[in-house]
Image (tube, grey):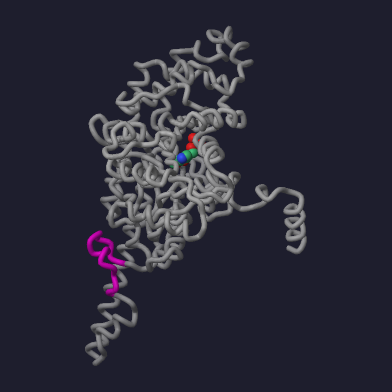
């Protein structure tokens, strides 16, 4: 131990402050579930009792559509007999502007996802290594160390890494509540801004994710108008992470339910928006299920930001091989139409299957219309409304129910008991097994509670016939203190699942 301390001290002296601070978040409890999963990962035949990964916001539902396109278009790749004649040109290309046909194709895709209600200028597209790289890039362009961005809660945990770690930027939470479905309000924005100001923190802007991770909801026009007026009044930036824009699955057509900030700036009443303040983050990681391609986009309406971002993008370019392949795939209108429609249909089906399965066992989720996850309400299962109780429940879900889900506190949610559960990163059979495990867990909780109730009423009958006070006794053992929520959801007990899960397989 002493040696360990000694060596960690030496490392701290040898390396930079950035290298040795813990802002990366790797040590946060959010990653504990991942570590548990890595030790005991579910596999249908090799480890059928292992932990199922439901903490990964990946879209694996439409991979076959992309594979089919690749098979039909071998010339799009430079590593095939049909495409190898382009190998030399593409392999030698390294220009931080990117292949013009790639930028054009991405701009078209962004327009198509928004129902062609708005168009994007390829010259404003700056490449980055995924949305992760693009988010950091925009921070480097807009803020100095110590400056702050307001971020509505609950928010994507890795914003702490992507926006803060290497840039020195601070994030100030804008608190939202379940009572209004976690909508962003003007009051909460004002509070966060004023609190930051009182602490002498310079607020440079607001960052939102639309659709939201973890809520799986789109940010409506009214809320975005409030946001626009807010940032416009204060002359601070608005960064909209729209990487889930094509995961919208509800509505007809589904894209109708998504309003991009690009559309909102066209028509805000009583407000001349300073477009220099508006920036969009995009990537193909979620919409097309290509996180490994590391295709991130920073799109800014501000010329200076585009120029500066382009210079900085040398640190995180998209490989020319990937650009070349995607330029061809994304300009195939017929394929894109087929892919976008098929993808949202599959997501809708998966979402319905999962949320219906949860509902059958008395678990509700925030009503959502987008994303690769649900925001599951397990407040009824907390022993008390604290983050300690949330942590206890989370450990039970990981270690006994054998599902890696993500607890609300890792998203900076201010109400304990919410969990994000991903449903699009697995096949049908694995999803069914996950639902079965949840069902068993809930049924066992109910059985145990019924058993306790029966025994207690027998005990109190005995005591009352022996002259004891029934009410005193119930109070003493802590029964009948079920929260008002319990009766509405059909789950009987507010008690800690820790003591109640012995029956879970
Ligand atoms: C809101 C949000 N932004 C950014 C990212 C990072 O995406 P990428 O894989 O493109 O870096 C994620 C990934 O989960 C996310 O949910």
In the image, 22 versus 404, the foreground residue is: 22
Q: Position of residue 11 (x, y in %)?
A: 74, 52
Q: How many marks?
A: 0
First to last magenta residue range: 480-493
Q: Relative to 267, is 469 above or below? A: below
The answer to whether residue 196 of the structure is visible from this angle is: yes
Question: Where does the C terminus fall, quadrant-wise?
Answer: bottom left
Question: Where does the N terminus fall, quadrant-wise?
Answer: bottom right
In the rendered image, residue 382 lying in the magenta stretch gets the answer no
Q: Which residue is found at the position 30% from the left and 46% from the top?
A: 355
Q: Relative to 277, is 10 above or below? A: below
Q: Position of residue 465 (x, y in %)?
A: 22, 89
Q: Which residue is found at the position 76% from the left and 53% from the top?
A: 13
In the image, 444 versus 86, the foreground residue is: 86
Q: Position of residue 127 (x, y in %)?
A: 53, 28
Q: Which residue is found at the position 36% from the left and 68% from the top?
A: 495
Q: Is residue 437 left or right of residue 139?
A: left
Q: Position of residue 289 (x, y in %)?
A: 44, 31
In the rendered image, residue 488 lying in the magenta stretch gets the answer yes
In the image, 177 versus 149, the foreground residue is: 149
The answer to whether residue 50 of the structure is visible from this angle is: no
Q: Relative to 113, is 404 above or below? A: below
Q: In which quadrant of the rendered view does residue 317 lie?
A: top right
Q: Is residue 160 left or right of residue 20?
A: left
Q: In which quadrant of the rendered view does residue 205 lie?
A: top left
């Amino acid at each position: 131990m002493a040696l360990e301390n000694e060596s960690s001290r030496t490392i701290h002296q040898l390396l930079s402050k950035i290298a040795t601070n813990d802002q990366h978040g790797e040590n946060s409890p959010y990653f504990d579930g991942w570590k548990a999963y890595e030790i005991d990962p579910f596999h249908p035949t090799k480890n059928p009792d292992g932990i199922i990964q439901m903490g990964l916001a990946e879209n694996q539902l439409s991979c076959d559509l992309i594979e089919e396109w690749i098979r039909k278009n071998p010339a799009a790749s430079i590593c095939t007999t049909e495409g190898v004649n382009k190998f030399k040109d593409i392999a030698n290309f390294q220009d931080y502007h990117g292949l013009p046909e790639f930028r054009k194709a991405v701009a078209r895709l962004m327009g198509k996802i928004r129902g062609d209600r708005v168009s994007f200028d390829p010259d404003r597209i700056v490449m980055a290594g995924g949305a992760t790289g693009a988010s950091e890039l925009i921070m480097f362009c807009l803020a100095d160390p110590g400056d702050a961005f307001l971020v509505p809660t609950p928010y994507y945990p890795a914003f702490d890494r992507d926006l803060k770690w290497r840039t020195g930027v601070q994030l100030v939470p804008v608190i939202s509540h379940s009572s209004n479905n976690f909508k962003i309000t003007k009051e909460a924005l004002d509070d966060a801004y004023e609190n930051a100001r009182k602490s002498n923190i310079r607020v440079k802007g607001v960052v939102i994710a639309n659709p939201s991770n973890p809520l799986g909801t789109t940010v409506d026009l009214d809320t975005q108008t409030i946001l626009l007026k807010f940032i416009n009044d204060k002359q601070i930036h608005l960064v909209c992470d729209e990487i889930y824009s094509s995961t919208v699955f509800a509505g007809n057509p589904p894209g109708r339910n998504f309003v991009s900030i690009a559309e909102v700036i066209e028509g805000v009443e009583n407000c001349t928006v300073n477009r220099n303040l508006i920036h969009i983050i995009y990537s193909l990681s979620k919409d097309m299920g290509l996180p490994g391609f590391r295709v991130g986009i920073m799109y800014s309406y501000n010329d200076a930001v585009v120029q500066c971002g382009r210079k900085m993008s040398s640190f995180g370019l998209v490989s020319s091989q990937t650009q070349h392949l995607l330029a061809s795939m994304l300009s195939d209108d017929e394929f894109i139409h087929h892919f976008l429609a098929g993808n949202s249909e599959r997501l809708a089906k998966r979402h319905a299957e999962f949320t219906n399965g949860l509902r059958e066992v008395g678990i509700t989720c925030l009503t959502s219309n987008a994303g690769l996850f649900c925001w599951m309400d397990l407040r009824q299962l907390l022993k008390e409304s604290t983050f300690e109780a949330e942590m206890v429940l989370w450990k039970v879900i990981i270690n006994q129910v054998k599902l890696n889900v993500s607890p609300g506190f890792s998203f900076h949610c201010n109400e304990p008991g919410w969990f994000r559960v991903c449903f699009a990163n697995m096949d049908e059979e694995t999803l069914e097994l996950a639902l079965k495990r949840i069902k068993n867990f809930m049924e066992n909780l109910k059985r145990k509670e019924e058993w306790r109730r029966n025994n207690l009423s027998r005990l109190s009958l005995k005591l009352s016939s022996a002259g004891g006070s029934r009410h005193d006794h119930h109070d003493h053992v802590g029964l009948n203190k079920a929260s008002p929520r319990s009766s509405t959801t059909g789950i009987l007990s507010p008690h800690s699942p820790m003591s109640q899960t012995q029956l879970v397989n």
